[in-house]
Amino acid sequence: MSGLNALKLVQAKREKGNSPQHARRQKLSTKLAEQIQLAKAQQSGAEFSPVRVRTVKDEATGQSRKVEVPKKLKPWWWSDEKGKLCITVRYGARTLEIVEGKNAIETDSIADVITSLQVIRSAVDAGELDKRIDAVMGQVKASSAKDSATSSRPTLKLPAKS
């Protein structure tokens, strides 16, 4: 038993899986990390393109193999007419409002863009933007429900020609 005394023993229960909010938080945090790396590469004058692994089937042999292909990554910042850099945070195809009614952050330089993205990422990891993410997800669900309602309308049957 002397070996077990050296261990810190606790009562713990493993959860079945991540909550949907935690999964959304992780998704946004990962995208913010990519944007931070893109901004750092732009600041240093280097190229950055993240890669993802895809399975490709060889036509000649019929065997599948994994290939790394570059991801298309668009920066979340742009230069406005005053010469300032504006940053928007995107969740999927939608822009996330950081504060009610405000969807962009104005900065002076690419170094400020990096700092702002790091601050946003720490806020996302702390769960401060969960309500904003849920609001965007509510918009997505509402629009998909609207699309399915319009597609389930009955079609007009024309009378047969005699």
Image: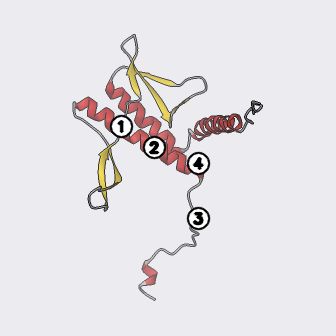
Q: Are marks 1 and 2 in contact (CB under 8 Å)?
A: no
Mark 4 surroundings: few (<14), some (14-19) or many (≥20) residues within 10 A: some
4 or 2: tag closer to the N-terminus: 4
Mark 1 surroundings: few (<14), some (14-19) or many (≥20) residues within 10 A: few
| Marks 1 and 3, how far apart at CA | 33 Å
| Residue 157 at x, y percent in the picture | 75, 33
Residue 16 against residue 145 in the figure, above or below? below
Which numbered circle lies on residue 29?
2
Q: Which residue is mark 4?
A: 21
Residue type pointed to by label 2: Ser
Residue reaching furthest top? 82
- Name the mark nearer the viewer: 1 or 3: 1
| Residue 101 at x, y percent in the picture | 60, 23
Residue at the image position 36 percent from the left and 27 percent from the top: 112
| Marks 1 and 2, how far apart at CA | 18 Å
Q: Which residue is mark 1?
A: 72
| Marks 4 and 2, how far apart at CA | 12 Å
| Marks 4 and 1, how far apart at CA | 26 Å
| Marks 4 and 3, how far apart at CA | 14 Å
Q: Which residue is mark 3?
A: 16
